[in-house]
Image (cartoon, rainbow, N blue to C red):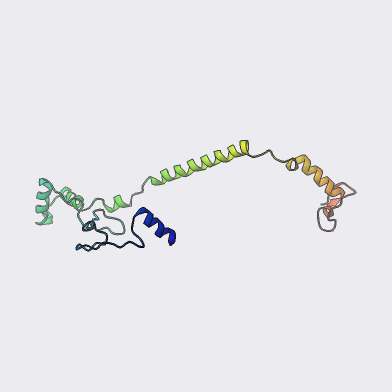
Amino acid sequence: MLPKAAWSLVLGKGGRGRRGMHSSEGTARGGGKTPRYTNCYAQRHYPMPEEPFCTELNAEQQALKEKEKGSWTLLTHAEKVALYRLQFNETFAEMNRRSNEWKTVMGYVFFFFGFAALVIWWQRVYMFPPKPITLTDEWKAKQLQRMLDMKVNPVQGLASRWDYEKKQWKK
């Protein structure tokens, strides 16, 4: 909590130790009236916008709005569609259509995977030291032979699985 309050004081955005100025408009930090909420775009979960999509109408659209007040049987299909487009931005089919954003996201994901792979390859080639000699196959074979010669863990371990007379692994 302290760093948040300190940063708000440093940046001058209020916070602790600073009081809001109340005005006659009722807003806490001055300025004027808050802008009214405008939601002219219909969404899937809330399909009815608070305002129509087109608020400024030309002469043709105003004539169509006047014609709308009469009988709807006199309206043609094209006029009904034009009235719908005045009220709403998109149809449900247009709202529910798939976007191609997933292609962009997958492109960025593959780009960063490729970049990370290049960084890892560069580190293996130029930064990391060479593998120690104990990780070579020759060293591992010699180590295994030495453990068998010393009969390491003869009851249940490695030496218990080696046949010393036939010089091969037990079956």
- Residue 129 vs residue 6: left or right? right
Query: Residue 24 placed where, x, y %?
Result: 19, 63
Q: Is residue 133 left or right of residue 122?
A: right
Work out whether 122 lies above or below 82.
Answer: above
Determine which quarter of the picture holds residue 138: top right
Is 48 or 137 nearer to us in this picture? 137
Name the residue at 43% across, 58% down.
Answer: 3
Say which of 84 and 144 sits in front. 144
Q: Position of residue 79 (x, y in %)?
A: 15, 49
Q: Is residue 102 above or below residue 45?
A: above
> Where residue 150 sits in the image (x, y, percent)?
87, 50
Picture residue at 43% right of the left edge, 61% below the top: 2
Q: Position of residue 76 (x, y in %)?
A: 14, 50
Residue that extends furthest to the front in the rendered view of this protein? 17
Residue 52, located in which quarter of the rendered image? bottom left
Q: Is residue 8 above or below residue 111?
A: below
Q: Nearer the viewer, residue 29 or 129?
A: 29
Tally of marks? 0
Classify residue 167 as left or right of residue 125.
right
Quarter of the image containing the N terminus? bottom left
- The residue depicted at 84 percent of the width and 51 percent of the height is 162
**Residue sticking out furthest to the right:** 165
